[in-house]
Structure formats: C-alpha cells, structure tokens
Image (tube, grey):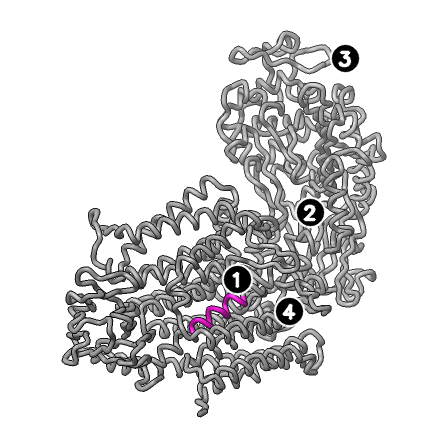
Amino acid sequence: MLRILLLVLQLAFLGLLYLILFGFARSLLRDLRGAERMERASRTGIGRLAVIESPDGEPPVGRDIALGAINSIGRNVNNTIYVEDDFVSANHAMLTFRGRSWFIEDQGSTNGTYVNGHRVERPVALSYGDELTIGRVRMRLER
Amino acid sequence: MRITWRRAELAMLLPLLLLVPLGFVLTHVAEAGKLEPGPLGLALGYLAIMAGAHLVLTLSGHRGDQLLLPVVATIGGVGLVMLNRLPQDLAGTSAFGLQLGMAATQLLWFGVGVVAMLAVAVGFRDDGLLRHYKYTWAALGAALLLATFVFGKEVFGARLWIDLGPVQFQPGEFIKIVLVVFIAGYLAENRALLTGASARIGPISIPPLPYLLPMLAIFVMVMLMVVVLKDLGTALLFFGIFLTMLFVATGRRSYVLIGLILFVAGSFVAYQLFGHVRARVDVWLNPFADPSGAGYQTVHALYAFGRGGLFGEGLGQGLLPSVGGSFPAVQTDFIFAATAEELGLVGAFGLLALALLLVFRGLRIAMLAHDDFSAMLAVGLTTSLGLQTLIIVAGNAKLIPLTGVTFPFVSYGGSSLLASFLVIGLLLSISHRAARVAEPGAP
Amino acid sequence: MIATNVRRLALYLLLSFALVSAGLAYWQVVDAQALASRPDNPQLVAARRSAPRGSIFDARGKLLASTEVVNGVAQRTYADSAFSHVIGYASLRFGTTALERAWDDLLAGRADPNPLRDIVSDILDRPPAPKDLILTVDQRLQDFAAQRLGNRVGAVVALDPRTGAILAMTSTPTFDASALTGDSAASARAMERITAAKDDPLVDRTRQGRYPPGSTMKVFTAAAALDAGAITPSTTFKGQPRQETEGFVVEGFRITEHDLSPVQPALWQLSEALQVSSNIYFAHVGLELGADAFLDYAHRFGFCVGRRIGPPDHALTVDASYVTDAADGDCSQFSDRVEVASAAFGQAQVIATPVQMALIAATIANDGTMPDPYVVADARTHAADPAAGPSDEVLQRYASGGGTRVVSSQTAAQVRKVMVDAVEGQLGRLYAGQGDVSLYGVGDVQTAGKTGTAQRGAGQAPHSWFIGFAPAEPGGAPKIAVAVIVEGGGSGAGLAAPIGGQVMAEWLRLEGK
C-alpha cells in the first residue's frame, strides 16, 4: 500500500516538474518568435546614440538619437546631430556606418573627438557600447 | 507610480507552491513509512524567499527577464528537496546561537544569495563600474587567486578553500565572475579594432597578439591552478569560459581549436608529470580496477545511476547517500548522481533541461543586450553556469574525469550559491537596461 | 555579429547537453542491468541484508549453513568450520565465496533450477524464493578428516570414484565463517584477524593449493607409459641398478636417487620400482614415454587447465595443475629431456592441487575413466525450519556426467595392482608401512596407494603426500579415493599415508564396508 502511494507521489512530483518545464518551453518559444520580430525591427535602424552627459542640455541627457548611415556632428544647426556646447566646433565629427561597422572621423575640431577616452587621430571603427566624447557631451553608441 | 506586473514570472513561480512541498512530503512519507505531511517549514521558507524576490522586482519596476527567477527557483527547489532528503548532519552551521542542519543552512544561503541578486539587479543601474575598471577587477581576481595559492586549505585533495576565522569561502566561485567581467571588458574594447587582422600558418589562422597574449596568460593561470591548487574542475571551467567568450567575440572556430590544442597538450604534460592528475584520469578510464579504493566514488555514482533507471527509486529511497555509512561529497560533487538515482532518468533529464533553459535565457539576454560589453558579459556569465553544470554532470556520469565543481543552485555550499545568485543578478540588470533602451521614450 | 555567434554557441551548448543526456541514458537504462548485478552494488547488499537465504545440508541432511531473519536483518550462521572452505561465506561486507558464490542465484532465490518456473515468477513478480542445497559431502567424514589433520597445515580430498561425488574436502587451518557474515565493524575485525593469521586460513588448499606432487606423480607416469605401450609391467632398465648409486646422467645432468635404505638396489620391474619409489626407474619410464606423449597424457588427466567441480553454471573452480613451466598459463613444451625425466617422478616444474591428485587416484580406481567431480547433490525447496532437516521436495538433482575415459581398463587394472603392491607388497611395507590401511581396521580389504615426499627448497621440510583408494581387490569397484597433503609434513609415509588410510577406513566403516 505504502509502496503504491510512494509511487503515485513520485510520479506526481515528476509530472509537476515536467509541467513546469513545458510552461518554460512555451514561453521560450514565444520569446524566440518575439526576438525575431524585434531583431527584424532593429535591423532597419542601424544604431542610436544615447546621451549620457550634456551640461548645456542640448541634446538632453537620456535622449536616444536614432542614427542614419551618415551623421555629422557639430555646433552648426545644419548638422544631423546638433550639439550645443562651447567646446564643440561647428563641424566637429562624422559618424558613418560602412559595411558592418561604425566609424568616427574627426573633422579637424579644436578640442578633438574621443573614443573611450582616447583621442581620435584618423577614422576609427566603433563597437556598440563605445563612448564618444565631443566637447563636454558624452554619448554612447548603442544598437 | 504605476506598477508593471511581472505576470509571466508570477505564473511560472506558482507551480513551485506545489512542487517543493510535494518533494518534502514525499521524502517524509518514504522515511516515516506513513502518510503524514511532516515538517514543511523549510519548504515554506524557500517559497517565501522566492515570493519576496518577485515582489521586490515588481515593486522596483524591474523590466528584466521574467523567466530567469522562476527557472532558478525551480532548480533550487529540486536541490533543496534533495538536500532536505540527505542526512542533516553532513554539514550545517551553528552561527548566531542557532543550530542549523544542512538544508536549513542552505536555505539561509538562499536568502543571502537572493538579497545579493536583488541588490545587483535593482541597484546596478550603470555598468561603468564594471566596464571602466576592468583592470582593477582583474587585479582583484589575481589577488584572490594569489590568496588561494598562499592561504588555501586542502579539502578532498584540492586547495579550494580560504579560512577566515569563522567564515570559510571558496574564492574560485568569485574569481570566476571577476574573470568574466575582465574578459568581457577586454574583448568588447578591442573587438572592432582587431577583427580581421590575423596571421596564417598553413590552414590555421593564428590569433593576433592582443588575443594571443591574454589567451596565453589565462592558459598559464589555469595550468598553475591544476598544478598548485590541484583544482582541475575550476581550471577546466575558467579555460572553457575564456574560449567560449573568445569565440563569441571573434566568431573564429580556429581560435577555439588552438585553445583546445593548448589545453589538451597541457593536460597531457600534467598527466605525465603530476600524480594527482594521473590518478584522476586513471580512475576515470577504469574505475572498476579499484572499486573499493580510488574508484569508489565513481563506481558508486554509476551504481546509483543504474539503480535510478527511468523513474527513479523514489525520493528518500535512494541508496547512494548511505553507501559505506555516509557517502563522501554526496551533498556537493555527487548531488546530481543522488538526484538521478531518486528521480530517475526522467528527473535527471528534467534537471538538465532546466539548466539548459537557464542557458538559453542567458544567451537571449546577450543577444538583446544594448552594447557589446553587456553582451559579452551576459555570454560569459551564462557560459559559466552552463559549463559548470556540464562539467559536474559529465564527471558524475564518467564522461569526463571527475572534478570537484558544484552544480549551480543544487549543490550544498554558500560560496557557490552566493556567486550563482550574483550571476543571475548581473543578468537581470543587463536585461533590464536592454529593455529600457529598446522601448522608445524610456527615461 | 555577436548575435550570430551567440546563436551558434547556443547550438553547441545544446549539443553538449544532448551528449551528456545520452551518457546518462546509457548508465540509467542501457547498462543499468549490468551495473545492478555487480556484487558490490549496495542494491544487492541492501537486498541481502534482509533477504532470506537457502540452507545448506550435508549428504545426510545435517544442517551446515542457515539464515535467520531477525528484525529484518538476515543473520547467516555456519555450523561447522570444517566446511568453511568448501561452503565459503556469504557476507554483506566481503561478498560471497566458494559454494555460496557458485550457487548464489539459487540460494538467494534469484533463479529457479527450472527455467520455466523462473519466467513465471518473473511475470508474477513473486518475491525471490530461496532454494536449499544438499551436498554430497558427509559431515562425519569431513569432521573426521579435519580432526586427523588437526593443527597441521594441509588438505584432504575424498571422493566416490564411481560417481565423482565428493565425500570430504577439507583444508586446514580453517576459520569461523559465521564471524564474517555481517557488515559490522566486528566482521571487519574478524577478517583482519583471519588475514593476519599465519598460513593463510582463507585459502582452500584442496582447490587453490598447488604443490609439487613428488612421488605420487609416479602413478600418473606409470599409467601413461603403460597405456601408450612404452612399457609393460615387467619392463626393466639395464643400467638402473648401477645408476641407483652412481646417478643417471641425462644430457650431462646427473639425476640422483633418494635414500633407498634399507633396500639394496636391484634390477626392478614396475611393481618393485613403485614400491621402493625409484626415481631412476621412473626417469627411464618418462624418457621411454617421450615428451610429446607425456604432455598428451597430462592433458587427458586434466593437467594444464583449470578444473570445475559441479555443473558449469554453478561450478567451484579449481586452480590448474601443470607438468611444465606454467609461466604462459598453459602447458608449454618441456625444455629438455632432463625436465621430462624429472617430471616423471614428480619434480621439475610439476605442480598439482590435491583435487587433481585425488582425481588421478579415482581414475585408476574407476577402470581408467576419470569421474566428473560434483559436490552439490540436489536443490530443494526452502525448509521453513532448517533445524528440522531439509524438505523432501527435490527441485533438481545434479550428478556426474559419466566421466571421461583417460586410459584403458587394462592399464587401470595394471596400475591398480602395482598401487596395491606399493602399500601391501613386501618392499612397499618397508616404505609405506605406516600408510598400510590394513593397520586401521579394514584389514580384510585391499588398499591401493602411493606416498609422496615432495622436496622443497633447502632447509624446508618436504611436503608429505598420499593418494590411494579402497577396496582395491582385482575386478572390484573401490568406494573411496583420497588425496592427502600435509605441508612440511616430512615423508609421505610419516603423516599423509596414515591420515589417508584412516579416512578410507573410516568411510568403509561408516558405509558398513
């Protein structure tokens, strides 16, 4: 009697474990489909710049700037990305997407362009997560 | 403040209300021989901890992955049921004037681990601390490792423990995290600059120096661990994590191949030179040569698997824990064999599937991460849990030589549990930031 | 790009988990049965701890081994330490040995002698039903033999040459098997004591003792040479009388005689040569027989391969005996003629177990056919109260397979005659006089026999041997054949022959002659 009872309890335990597993598997599959959609969506946008620090508030901290293939950065309002900061040159830098990578090129600015704290001398490839410093404005390249 | 309910998380946590107490009851019925619920305090305490974690995540508006916590809670629940089933005097604590048995001590560590996880998941809003100070972290890891070399205490033939008066801890568990942080930082920083450039010797492309140097450095560190600490399992784990992260960063199988060749060559030399390595390997190749001596643990683990069969001997009815009076390391290295005996192949597959789910969740977080560093970090952390599970399970089943690493969230041990929960905390925080970035108009 | 690599990584990890799962499936399902049947698997140990086990009785139903289950713990006890070697022990800690091992499946009730019943029990999932065993060994003779050996180190094997039924099989020193059955610390201490004791009490000398047979080997040489036609009972060797004193030079090696006094060397025929146990005469016989024929007959007599006692699936194993160097585990060629000549009188590389020598005696006694030895007479249903004797329900009888013809009936008769002379002839009495069984109460039957004094290294007393059978009247059927060895017991006539004679006499007396 006890043996049968134990067997039933054991099977109940295992069954419950597999029910939980089944639940997880279902969520996983649903997420997988969701992830595909999200990836398809993100492929249309090639990246964005997240503003981390901006003493003069333009662009404001926390803004995500959607990027095109060619982006000019500077204090001149005709730039794709307009930055209001006394330490930024009128035409400061070019941020371009070529092939599979992002590149940053300084346009002969007075105070220079920095990637992760290193001054950029020639076009440099960026990876997602790299930090750009232009004047006193810090921005991060994100997917 | 508008509360965003974590509905999926809650839905997947609910079945645990049944599973964990059922495991406790089953164990008690098998031991007492009559139908009565027995003490359920620990099971309820465990459920309370997990419910608390869910509540904190919800109230703090956490947007991180909702399946991580339930998967971990399920694995940990099965683990706690197993630890509760073992003799409670195998380990324990008498801290704070309390006399706690093994399962109760583990529950205490579950509490500590979950608090640490929540602190990291909720409090870690900026990853600059990890990203920018990677060399500081590397130095910290090196210091911990050095401390183990110097002050380490040998247990079961491996020098894993550091004794700090009342507290003992396994630095290897934490070095693992620090190592992942450093490698992620290093690879993320150098990735874009370096992909492409590589020398070739015949069909094999040689990694450029910035990859080769850390690879050699880590290889040397790992070999030192094998020789000085005699900790084969952690050495294998570290090297595996590094190679995996290198592969993900560069996409080159050849680097992994070179790393593996290095490792095999190093292992071969270690086999030739060092008795403790040779002993491990010989036992692995033929444990039945000395079934009551060197092969004792391996042989009895295999017997336990065999007895388990498809559906198991039943919780609380396995023989492995009582082999030879008390089977050594059944609560740590051999917890999987004991589980497989009592829950059978079905239960063992379930546990492995849960671990695999955890890995998939972690990798998904990596794919959705908003920058390369976070992605590499998530890959490394996930791999550390996945590989560790693989190494200990394969070691139990005599597929590779047995090494003394823990089964994350299942094996008894505070260091392991705390480190594993820190990993989950980091993963949660990464996925939280990714979710924030992904949603337009997020603050 | 990272996303692609992560996806690949996920695939690799999935494969690794699948591989590990396949490994688990192998141990938990495919190989589970093989693992479960290994003797040190705690599953078996746990099952044995509480499982009843069949009893073992002697030929007349005297209880020798039984298991009592008290509070769910099975306690096995052995009644007679003279049986410790042949029955062995069934220990929770040390596994099983001897008959306890060979018949474990029936004793534990895992198998039924009838395979059909086996299948039915399997289907109905019946609890294991232990079976009892009845031995061919008679406790009275076994105890008598053990008592004759006393505290000397040695072995006695006695069997019925007509059937192969083992009548006594005892080895000294012995040990208390009951002390080893538990898995407590007490059992471990008992085992430590036993293994630490001198003269290896755990060794069954009847089956595992391998000794140079000395002159008892001449019985084999005589039978082989007569059967091959190399000699007749009246063959003489011209140079032999002179060589008895001067030595017989074979390929530059001088073979010398043992101390023949008080007999003076003469031109001897087979009978006299066996009575005085002339090494020179038998060296000639060996050379006359030749190396190839010698090896051929050695194989026929069961040298060179391990032997089994009982049916193949329940056999007690006996270590192999050899006539040449056993280095490669089989009888290799003789290295030269000197080795052949020396092997003919039981020296050189010849080693034999007491079981082997008893079977040589039994072959001569049984008209040249070597009986298949067996020690379990039948298996019966388990008797609920073993103290009251075995049940009457016999499940299966085991008997000899009829034996193997080794030498012709005529050869056997000729060897029987010279073996009778060796204990009862005029010269034989001078040598084996004390082994003459007529001195011990069965004076009206003839006895055949041969003593042996197996030389060992310098400074060590030789092993004392005797093989023989009785009654040995021409044309009659002997009822018992024996082999006796006393380690370091000196001359064969001194110790082994009297014990052999007494054991045979005791058996004839018990059997009412």
Chain label for disc 4: B
Q: Is residue B7 above or below residue B91?
A: below
Which quadrant holds residue B417?
A: bottom right
The spot of residue A124 in percent (x, y) is 20, 63
Q: Given this view, does label 2 or label 4 mark the residue nearer the observer? A: 4
User: Viewer-proximal residue, C144 or C3?
Assistant: C3
Q: Gap in Å between the C-alphas at discs 4 and 1?
A: 16 Å
The residue that label 3 is drawn on is C262
The residue that label 2 is drawn on is C165
Callout 3 environment at 10 Å: few (<14), some (14 to 19), or many (20+)? few
Determine which of the numbered discs, if any, sits on residue B105 in the image.
Answer: 4
Q: Given this view, does label 2 or label 1 mark the residue nearer the observer? A: 1
Q: Earlier in the sequence, mark 4 or mark 1?
A: 4
Q: Which residues are magenta?
A: B417-428
Q: In the image, what residue occupies the spot 71% across and 57% down?
A: C133
Q: In the image, what residue occupies the spot 69% across and 41% down?
A: C204
Residue type (three-letter) at the residue carrying disc 3: Pro
The spot of residue A143 in percent (x, y) is 27, 75
Q: Is residue C419 left or right of C23 when viewed as pictured?
A: right
The spot of residue B191 in percent (x, y) is 27, 61
Q: Gap in Å between the C-alphas at discs 2 and 3?
A: 40 Å
Q: Main secondary structure of the magenta part?
A: helix
Which quadrant holds residue C211?
A: top right
